[in-house]
């Protein structure tokens, strides 16, 4: 029986937005608009270059160009599908099933569940300890607008909605349709054993909307979701326990291998 204090919010019905330059009458498209444009442009250039050359080099360039053209026009990439990657926008909230990267991290903070919950529930506090979150603006009690920085100095934006909430214990959310980065997650607040404070457990799932190059860059630069959450939780702990955040993280620097392992954690347990 569900606890009477738990609030599960019903999702509103969203219509798919129209006006895309590429129609998509078939299921299975996994390339976003920008990537499709880039594939078509590169494919056309290689095809023309191949036609201008002779022999084997021209044939190889032409074949590569034709493959890129087909990729861009169809919006489908077999390699992305095999890797579980998609850069196509979704008209559904959250992260589509079996796509993206799932990460779970926890930390113990010497503060009560009530204090930490209240701090987190004011979502505009999150940029204070989340390094890559530039701003969060509350649109109403449940919906918020997020702006985050990503590798390369660019920004991504999306609206999110709280879909489940249990005061002092749980906050769960998901991005709304049209998000630059599809994501969903939850944060739980449990009293730690021995009166040591509160265990804060964050579970998040992301869909790599920027395609394979974004995933590879994230691994190399140690900007994986798992590493980000570890560092953000360290800053939250410092902020709530001491009132300030140290300039250098207390946690040891993560290796590239650890970052890659964190990124490849994909929905093994729910």
Image (cartoon, helix red, strand yellow):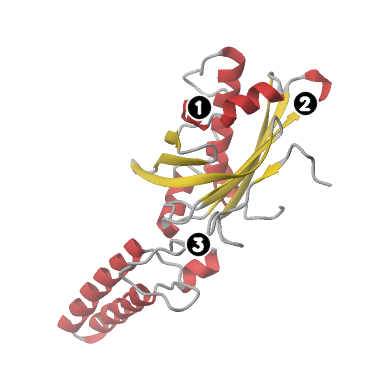
Q: Are marks 2 and 1 in contact (CB under 8 Å)?
A: no
The residue nearer to you, when weighing 121 against 73, is 121
Name of the residue lying farthest toward the left: 52
Residue 141, percent from left and from top:
54, 36
Name of the residue lying farthest toward the top: 242
- Between the C-alphas of marks 3 and 2, the distance is 37 Å
Up-down relation of residue 107 to residue 194 (above or below): below
User: Label 2 belongs to which residue?
Assistant: 192
Residue at 58% in and 25% down = 119
The residue nearer to you, when weighing 67 against 119, is 119
Q: Does label 2 or label 1 sit earlier along the sequence? A: 1
| Left or right, 105 with reference to 211 | right
- Between the C-alphas of marks 1 and 3, the distance is 31 Å
Q: Nearer the viewer, mark 3 or mark 2?
A: 2
Q: Is residue 232 visible?
A: yes
Disc 2 residue crowd, few under 14, some 14–19, many 20+, Cα 10 Å: some
Disc sitting over residue 85 in the figure: 3
User: Label 1 belongs to which residue?
Assistant: 125
- Between the C-alphas of marks 2 and 1, the distance is 23 Å
| Left or right, 216 with reference to 105 | left
């Amino acid at each position: 029986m569900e606890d009477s204090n738990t609030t599960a919010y019903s999702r509103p019905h969203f219509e798919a937005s129209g006006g895309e330059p590429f129609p998509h009458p078939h299921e299975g498209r996994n390339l976003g608009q920008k990537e499709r444009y880039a594939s078509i442009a590169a494919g056309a250039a290689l095809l023309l270059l191949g036609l201008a050359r002779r022999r084997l080099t021209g044939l190889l360039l032409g074949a590569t160009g034709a493959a890129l053209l087909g990729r861009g026009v169809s919006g489908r990439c077999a390699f992305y599908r095999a890797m579980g990657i998609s850069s196509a926008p979704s008209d559904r909230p959250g992260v589509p099933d079996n796509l993206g990267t799932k990460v779970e991290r926890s930390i113990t903070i010497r503060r009560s569940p009530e204090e930490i919950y209240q701090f987190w529930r004011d979502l505009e506090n999150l940029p204070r300890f989340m390094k890559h979150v530039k701003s969060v603006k509350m649109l109403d009690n449940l919906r918020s607008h997020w702006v985050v920085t990503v590798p390369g100095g660019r920004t991504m934006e999306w609206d999110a909605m709280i879909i489940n909430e249990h005061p002092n214990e749980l906050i769960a959310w998901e991005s709304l349709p049209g998000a630059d980065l599809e994501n969903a997650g939850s944060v739980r607040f449990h009293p730690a054993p021995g009166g040591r404070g509160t265990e804060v457990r964050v579970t998040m799932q992301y869909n790599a909307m920027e395609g394979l190059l974004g995933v590879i860059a994230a691994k190399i630069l140690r900007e994986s979701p798992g590493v980000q959450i570890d560092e953000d939780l360290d800053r939250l702990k410092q902020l709530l326990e001491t009132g300030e955040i140290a300039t250098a993280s207390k946690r040891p620097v993560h290796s590239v291998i650890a970052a890659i392992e964190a990124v490849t954690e994909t929905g093994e347990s729910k």
